Amino acid sequence: MSDEPLTCASAPSAQGARERDDKGERVRDIFRAIARKYELFNALSSLGIYRLWLRRVARTAACAPDDRVIDVAGGTGDVTFELCRTCPPASVELTDFTKEMLDIADDHIAAGKARGVAVRTTVADAMDLPFEDGSFDVYTVAYGLRNFSDRELSMREARRVLRPGGTYVALEFSTPSNPVWRAVYNAYLGGVIPFVGGHLTHDRAGFDYLVSSIREFPPQVRVAEELRRAGFGSVEYHLCTGGIATIYRATAR
Ligand SMILES: C[S@@+](CC[C@H](N)C(=O)[O-])C[C@H]1O[C@@H](n2cnc3c(N)ncnc32)[C@H](O)[C@@H]1O
């Protein structure tokens, strides 16, 4: 547990709501523009390491054959299809607020990547999911948390759509604590990501945003505390590749 003071949620204000809308629009514009090149960018920029992390996400989710899963900010479906491969559940609601990302997921479903699992795509905002309370056994979100304009609201919404006892799994970038590894990683973040991303998509500003969203993301103990406040118990996290990324697991109370 951290001794770090936690900031209190501030009172909602019209300006706060406007800032959240602005961030959401900006994020959607970026993913709309890069949708067709997103998977190539992932493969090139991570040298394939993200595949190992995906497998670990699936092992952490450990879906049972009758589980109903929701994959939030699921984009082109990497997590969904890894679950279908590793621990096929009964169904997956693959959701994202950028339709252009889900269009590619639909192409993958048509090509058989769901391996017989009932996967359905739905355009939906992580902070306002169009599903009844307790609809799902497992909730996954990969590289979504840092893009959400109200992270804690997304966690409360996750808690709402999960049944009590349901499993929450999040994968997100994080900052390594080892200073040497951190320096290498920071050089990579500031150089390789905007370079590869900018060349592939001609949207360097978009990739500058993605890098700053990674750098500004809070440490693991803060995210764990937010999950507890949102109504989760048994919160744990596991570092991937020396802390470049972190997998969070929690149980809905
Ligand atoms: C970096 S991509 C990750 C996609 C996928 N989870 C993966 O692992 O490849 C981030 C995704 O989050 C989506 N996103 C960002 N904010 C969102 C929100 N408020 N609600 C739903 N999706 C959101 C974006 O549209 C984008 O597809």
Image: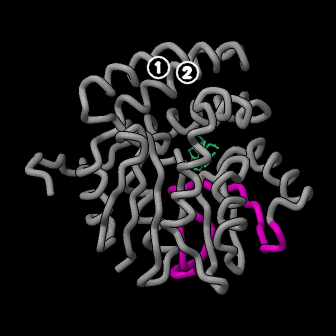
User: Which range of residues does the magenta coloring cover?
Assistant: 115-139
Residue 186: give x, y in percent of width and height: 38, 21
Tell me residue 100's x, y (percent): 78, 41
Residue 1 location, quadrant? bottom left
User: Can you tell me whether the CB of the residue at mark 1 lies under 8 Å from the nearest atom of ligand 1?
Assistant: no
Q: Position of residue 227 (x, y in %)?
A: 32, 62
Please tell me whether residue 124 belongs to the stretch shown in magenta.
yes
Image quadrant where residue 152 sits: bottom left
- Amino acid under label 1? Tyr
Q: Nearer the viewer, residue 101 or 153?
A: 101
For label 2, count other residues whose C-alpha is less than 10 Å away and answer few (under 14), some (14-19) or many (20+): many
Q: Residues within 10 Å of mark 1 (few under 14, many from 20)?
A: some
Of 73 and 90, nearer the camera is 90
Task: Pick the quarter of the image with the C terminus.
Answer: bottom left
The residue drawn where x is 32% and y is 26% is 182
Regarding mark 1 in the picture, which secondary structure is present there?
Answer: helix
Q: Secondary structure at mark 2?
A: helix
Q: Position of residue 155 (x, y in %)?
A: 41, 61
**Between disc 1 and disc 2, whose residue precedes?**
1
Asked if disc 1 and disc 2 are in contact, CB closer than 8 Å, the reply is yes
Residue 193 image label? 2
Please check the rendered image and state whether residue 225 is part of the magenta-colored stretch, yes or no.
no
Left/right placement of residue 253 relative to residue 202 reads left
Identified by mark 2, the residue type is: Ile
| Residue tagged 1 | 188
Residue at the spot x=37%, y=69% of the render? 250
Q: Residue at x 36, y 40 (%)?
A: 242
